[in-house]
Amino acid sequence: MAIWQDLVDEHGFGSRYSSVKRFVRKLKASQPQPCCVISTAPGEEAQVDYGAGPMVRHPETGKYCRTRLFAMTLAYSRKAVWLLTFKSSSQIWAELHERAFRLLGGAPRIVVLDNLREGVVAPDIYDPQLNPLLRDVLQHYGAVGFACRVRDPDRKGKVERSVGYAKGTPLKGMRFESLEEAQVYIDRWTERWADTRIHGTTKRQVLGMFLEEQPHLLPLPLEPFRYYDYGKRVVHLDGCVEVQGAYYSTPPGWIGHTVHVQWDALHVRVLDPSTGMLLREHLRQRRGRFCIKEQDRPPQTPPTTQHLLSRANKAGPAIGSLCKAIHRRDGQAGLRRVMGVLSLAKKYGAARTNEGCALALEVGAADYRFVRRYLERHPDTLMLRQVDPLIRELTHYRDLINTMTEGESR
């Protein structure tokens, strides 16, 4: 613009600015950058990317919306799979990979990814952080995700050309009334024209090279991947994390720390953020409900009724029967008496307490006070018992004492 203005003011230039702009463009020194040739073995690599799809009428709004075109291209044979979707998310991006693997009849060993947020959380040249869901999907099929360098489309040039080929040939200017109709159209075009063409670089038919590559793909697993949602949670003061309005316990020592959480329709999994190891797995609960493992409860947590009765049964048969009788007679008000009986077992021993509980049941006085008074008035007398072979008979000690006493008297 400054050159055109100087020409007009100082030299009486009569043409317009566009003429100067076209002339200056020709003067720019442009040195073409060489591009490398990436050769891959059959079944080794696939490249994926998003592109702009055709206009399709949305089922909810009734208006035409621009769809997204997912493309996966095998690097050896150039066999491509094109899938359409209205929106994108981490799970949709992972599901498209799985659908492409199923259509190809196998999975490649390496999947070259673009740095989309759905696939790469933190781009990095040497150590990119992949989306956990996509990473697990690829691992389920035996593949490894390889993220490209940022702003380096040449590394996945095969899928870039594949997206442009689909946009410029079958989908250009097309409109569809439903997503299913558009997908059927592009699948039919792929089978009729894209797979039977002679590729410009390989000089061979795409379908013929794909039939040569397909046996080298990794076999598909028997079961599809089980998808989940994931996120980060801070452990509350009660030792629980909140997921979809419900609360799930973590091991002791994690209060105030951040953990990774995965959940689906059935389970909630709490993971160590540094190692990825499973800390706890719970069944899904309704909103507002707690799911706490017994080993995760603090010591000061009041025990439940079933927990108290279970402890009583383990302490002794008569103790368990007495505690059940107390709970059956007094209900929730008798839980304190049950805890009192268990404290007697801890103080006087399980055997003596079981004896007292048996007597209480026998005389029809199934009560905590009776057992306590019995144990207080009938203390256990200690008896010397020979419990080890190294302990000699008492007569040996008697004879030894008599011998020593006689020697002193002499």
Image (spheres, grey):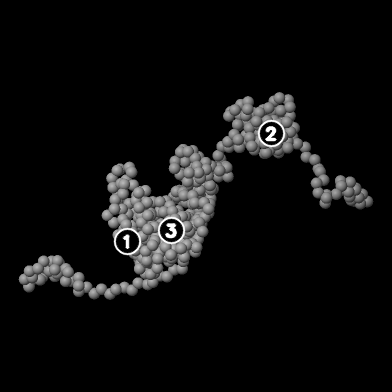
Q: Which comes before the other along the chain, label 2 or label 3? A: 3
Tell me the crowding category of disc 1: few under 14, some 14 to 19, or many 20 or more residues within 10 angstroms, Cα based. Answer: few
Q: Secondary structure at mark 3?
A: strand
Tell me how far mark 2 sits from mark 1, CA to CA. 80 Å
What residue is at 58 percent from the left and 36 percent from the top? 304
**Residue 130: numbered disc:** 3
Q: Is residue 102 left or right of residue 365?
A: left
Tell me how far mark 2 sits from mark 3, CA to CA. 57 Å
Q: Which comes before the other along the chain, label 2 or label 1? A: 1
Residue 258 sits above or below residue 245 on the image = below
Residue 345 at x, y percent in the picture? 68, 37
Q: Secondary structure at mark 1?
A: helix
**Residue 361: numbered disc:** none
Circle 2: residue type: Ile
Q: Which comes before the other along the chain, label 3 or label 1? A: 3
The quarter of the displayed image where residue 352 is located:
top right
Residue 307 visible in this rendered orientation of the protein: yes
Residue 391 at x, y percent in the picture? 83, 49
Query: Where is mark 1, residue-wise?
Result: 164
**Do labels 3 and 1 touch, CB within 8 Å?**
no
Residue 331 sits above or below residue 144 on the image = above
The residue sitting at the left extreme is: 12
The residue sitting at the right extreme is: 410
Tell me how far mark 3 sits from mark 1, CA to CA. 26 Å
What residue is at 25 percent from the left and 73 percent from the top? 30
What residue is at 63 percent from the left and 32 percent from the top? 338
Q: Is residue 187 left or right of residue 385?
A: left
Circle 3: residue type: Leu
Query: Where is mark 2, residue-wise?
Result: 319
